[in-house]
């Protein structure tokens, strides 16, 4: 489990992600609904290869929220950070940050 400065440093290295409770959250949007679905598919392929999966929510406007939590324990571990990195790799160059 990462705590304190370790978690702050890990999040500083992943500026697209933020901590909400005990979940890592990243919000993005595609240029349209179809591209948003393609982004989710790209993330699904990375996640499947990794053997862990983020929760995904998409709205009718193509806004996507990826949520990562530890299914076995409270808190964030290195495994959740690695999954966040896989999501980032799948989205690289294709997704726009969602408006806050």
Image (cartoon, helix red, strand yellow):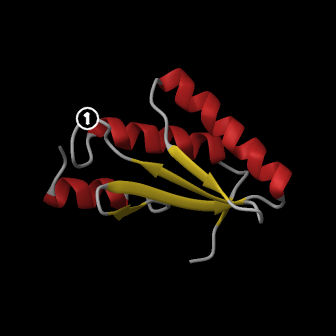
Q: Is residue 80 above or below residue 52?
A: below
* Residue 51, x across and y down, in percent: 46, 23
Residue on which disc 1 sits: 72
Quarter of the view holding residue 24:
bottom left
Residue 79, horizontal then vertical, whole percent: 33, 35
- Quadrant in which the C terminus is drawn: bottom right
Q: Is residue 4 left or right of residue 56?
A: left
Count of number-bearing discs: 1
What is the residue that sits farthest to the bottom in this orientation? Answer: 100
User: At which x and y percent is residue 25?
Assistant: 45, 58
> Which residue is located at x 57 percent, y 62 percent?
27
Q: Residues within 10 Å of mark 1 (few under 14, many from 20)?
A: few
Q: Which residue is at 15% across, 60% downward?
A: 4
If the image is split into quadrants, where does the N terminus sit?
Answer: top left
Q: Residue furthest left?
A: 4
Q: Which of these two is toward me, 63 or 85?
A: 63
Q: Position of residue 13 (x, y in %)?
A: 38, 55
Q: Is residue 2 left or right of residue 82?
A: left
Query: Which residue is at 26% across, 41% downward?
Result: 77
Task: Kindly state the secondary structure of the residue where label 1 is placed.
Answer: loop
Query: Position of 96 compared to 61: left or right?
Result: left
């Amino acid at each position: 489990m990462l705590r304190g400065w370790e978690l702050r440093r890990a999040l500083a290295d992943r500026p697209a992600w933020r901590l909400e409770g005990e979940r890592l959250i990243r919000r993005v949007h595609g240029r349209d609904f179809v591209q948003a679905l393609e982004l989710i598919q790209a993330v699904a392929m990375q996640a499947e290869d990794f053997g862990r999966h983020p929760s995904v929510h998409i709205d009718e406007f193509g806004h996507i929220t990826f949520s990562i939590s530890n299914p076995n324990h409270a808190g964030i571990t290195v495994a959740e950070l690695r999954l966040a990195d896989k999501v980032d790799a799948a989205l690289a160059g294709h997704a726009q940050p969602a408006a806050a």
